[in-house]
Image (cartoon, rainbow, N blue to C red):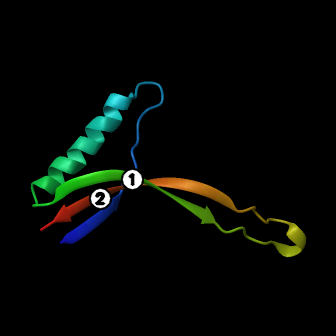
């Protein structure tokens, strides 16, 4: 079995956008890849730690932090 993993980054206008718009964007991606023979498996969250940066004498340094990204998983037999 073959797998394909894509980042899912959605964009909506905060004044007009709704969860419906997010769902439509996801649906478009699923439809596009389904037409190419890929089967949608799931939408998954992946958490990661971004390493801190150090600056000269601590000036300009940034602390590390955790972030979460969403990925779409497809499979093909």
Label 1's element? strand
The residue sitting at 53% across, 53% down in the picture is 68
Instruction: Give the quadrant of the C terminus.
Output: bottom left
Q: Nearer the viewer, residue 8 or 16?
A: 8
Crowd class of label 2 (few under 14; some 14 to 19; many from 20; radius 10 Å):
some
Which residue is denoted by mark 1 in the rendering? 44
Instruction: Give the quadrant of the N terminus.
Output: bottom left
Q: Position of residue 13 (x, y in %)?
A: 43, 32
The residue sitting at 72% across, 67% down in the picture is 52
Which residue is at the far top? 16
Q: Position of residue 37 (x, y in %)?
A: 10, 61
Q: How many numbered dots are placed on residues in this image?
A: 2
The residue sitting at 90% across, 72% down in the picture is 57
Q: Indicate the quadrant where residue 34 lies.
A: bottom left
**Is residue 16 shown above or below 3?**
above
Q: Nearer the viewer, residue 44 or 31?
A: 44
Q: Position of residue 29 (x, y in %)?
A: 23, 49
Q: Looking at the image, do the residues carrying marks 2 and 1 touch, with CB atoms under 8 Å apart?
A: yes
The residue sitting at 75% across, 62% down in the picture is 62
Which residue is at the far bottom? 56
- The reply, left or right, for residue 43 in relation to residue 38 is right
Crowd class of label 1 (few under 14; some 14 to 19; many from 20; radius 10 Å):
some
Q: Position of residue 40 (x, y in %)?
A: 21, 53
Q: Earlier in the sequence, mark 2 or mark 1?
A: 1
Which residue is denoted by mark 2 in the rendering? 73
- The reply, left or right, for residue 42 in relation to residue 32 is right
- The reply, left or right, for residue 50 in relation to residue 73 is right
Label 2's element? strand
């Amino acid at each position: 079995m073959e797998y394909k993993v894509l980042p899912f980054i959605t964009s909506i206008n905060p004044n007009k956008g709704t969860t419906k718009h997010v769902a439509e964007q996801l649906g478009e991606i699923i439809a596009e890849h389904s037409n190419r023979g890929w089967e949608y498996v799931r939408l998954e969250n992946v958490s990661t730690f971004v390493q801190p940066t150090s600056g000269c004498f601590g000036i300009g340094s940034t602390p590390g932090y955790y972030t979460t990204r969403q990925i779409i998983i497809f499979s093909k037999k």
